[in-house]
Image (cartoon, rainbow, N blue to C red):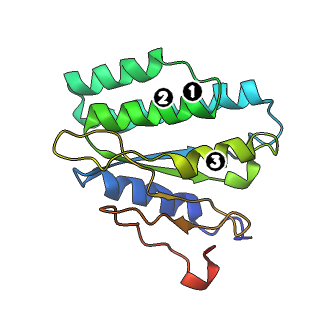
Amino acid sequence: NAARQTGKTTLFREVVAELQSDPTYFGLLLNLENFARLSAPRFYQRLDYQLQQNLAEQLQPEANADHLTCLTAVQQTPMADHFDLSDKLEIIGRMLKRRVVLIIDEFDATPPEILPDLLSTLRASTSPPAQATGGCTALPWWGCATSRHCWRARNRPSISPISSPYPTSRRQK
């Protein structure tokens, strides 16, 4: 496992900030640090709250009518399970006409009963590549902060994975 206090969260925040400067991507950082003992309904409720807060924070500096419409649509879409998470990410990508890059910090705190469905959804969260019309993005890259659930690049046409801060030997194949 990556040691505590090694700057992983800071690195993730820097990646999100860098993504925001690229009109192709929209970065969202979620932190599951205190989620380990939550029931499934409470897990998705807290995840939804965090997603909405981070989305609002990311959109704030250059808020416009499209951003407010996106935020409203996300707020009005309930999140009770992994399918709803996928729907919300699709809404964000489609409405902002950007590829959503979801970064999950402290992923190993995901409750065990939720993990299989959540991983399955993250792996399968794909759509046709965003063209000039925008559209939903695939989640081209997902990661976590520990070696147990190491970084994994997704090989998708027309999507370039973000470089990992870890050497290739630490990645799962």
> From what the image shows, is residue 156 above or below residue 47?
below
Q: Where residue 52 sits: x, y (%)? A: 48, 28
Whether residues under marks 2 and 3 lie with C-beta atoms below 8 angstroms apart, the answer is no
Q: Earlier in the sequence, mark 3 or mark 1?
A: 1
Q: Count up the numbered dots.
A: 3
Instruction: Decide which of 16, 154 is in the foreground and name it.
Output: 154
- For the residues marked 2 and 3, what is the alpha-carbon distance in whole angstroms? 22 Å
**Quick one: SS at disc 1?**
helix
- Residue lying farthest left? 132
Whether residues under marks 3 and 1 lie with C-beta atoms below 8 angstroms apart, the answer is no
Whether residue 51 can be seen here: yes
**Quick one: SS at disc 3?**
helix
Q: Quadrant of residue 111?
A: top right
* Quadrant location of the C terminus in the rendered image: bottom right
Q: Where residue 37 sits: x, y (%)? A: 83, 38
Instruction: Decide which of 112, 75 is in the foreground and name it.
Output: 112
- Compared across the picture, whether 23 is left or right of 12 comes to left
Residue under numbered circle 1: 49
Residue under numbered circle 3: 120
What residue lies at 57% left-to-right and 27% top-to-bottom? 49
Indicate the amino acid at tag 2.
Gln
Residue 52 is marked as: 2
> From what the image shows, is residue 165 above or below residue 59?
below
Indicate the amino acid at tag 3.
Ser
Q: Where residue 48 sits: x, y (%)? A: 57, 28
> From what the image shows, is residue 151 above or below residue 132?
below
Whether residue 53 can be seen here: no
* Quadrant location of the N terminus in the rendered image: bottom right
Q: Nearer the viewer, mark 3 or mark 1?
A: 3
Instruction: Decide which of 80, 50 is in the foreground and name it.
Output: 80
Residue 98 is marked as: none
Indicate the amino acid at tag 1.
Tyr
